Image: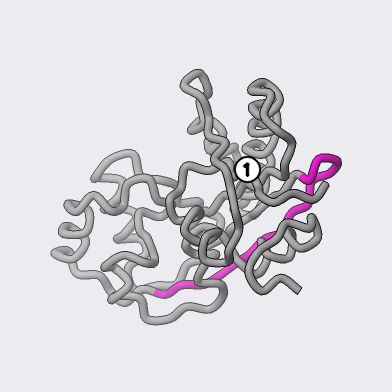
Amino acid sequence: MSAAFVYLASQSPRRRQLLEQIGVRYELLLPGAHEDAEALEAVRHRETPAEYVRRVTRAKLDAARHRLEALRLPAAPILCADTTVAIGRRILGKPGDSGQAREMLRALSGRSHRVLSAVALWSGTRRTEAHSVSHVRFARLPTVVIDAYVDSGEPFGKAGAYAIQSALAGWIEHIDGSYSGIMGLPLAETAALLRRAKVPHALAA
């Protein structure tokens, strides 16, 4: 399948921004009110961060394929992604409340962690996937900084309780990997999948 656009099955405004950055036309294919999208992100017992992020991305893609069929929309490739933060085998998902957000930020303070992103593309006949792992190190975060950041509301809806493009970036000492992957959509890997599916985008060879 080749198409002039892709369906983006993601509610993340950051993923939309990143696709726009590389000139990809997209249409949103979002979960309906009857779908429990958050349930797909529940962590399973003994699941590693890499297993988790890949499984969740595949589950999102499967749900989006069923959604496309049910809505009888025109055929086009479907793009899904998921990102998680991990310290060792511990997965830091989206905080449920301010207490969880503070606890996550205290755990990230003064140490390195991994940000794992998976992306999957359904081209009409097959699924292709790519993965990205980046390392981020925070300086030691004073309690007053953590409290102010949590009070801003920024941590909610974000894995690890932070966004790389937020004000907390001023406390990041080192990044090794994909900045866009840390934001939620690794662009080099995503662009490679789109090229294989013949989806046009800026500077495509």
Residue 88 visible, this angle? no
Is residue 129 shown in magenta? yes
- Residue drawn at point x = 65 percent, y = 64 percent: 201
| Residue found 36% across the figure and 73% down from its top | 138
Q: Is residue 1 above or below residue 130?
A: above
With 197 as the anchor, is 70 left or right in this view? Answer: left
Q: For this rendering, which residue is in front, 84 or 66?
A: 66
Report the magenta stretch's main SS: strand
Question: SS class of the residue under badge 1?
Answer: strand
Task: Give the residue pinned by disc 1.
Answer: 7
Q: Residue furthest right?
A: 125
Residue at image point 46% right, 48% down: 12
Please state the horizontal and vertical placement of residue 119, each as a whole percent of the image.
65, 53
Viewer-side residue, 90 vs 39 = 39
In the image, residue 56 above or below residue 113: above
Taking the image as shown, residue 154 lies to the left or right of residue 8, namely left
Q: Quadrant of the C terminus?
A: bottom right
Q: Is residue 78 left or right of residue 162?
A: right
Q: Position of residue 16 (x, y in %)?
A: 49, 53
**87 relative to 139 in the view: left or right:** right
Magenta stretch contains residue 186:
no
Image: magenta residue range: 123-137
Q: Quadrant of residue 22?
A: bottom right
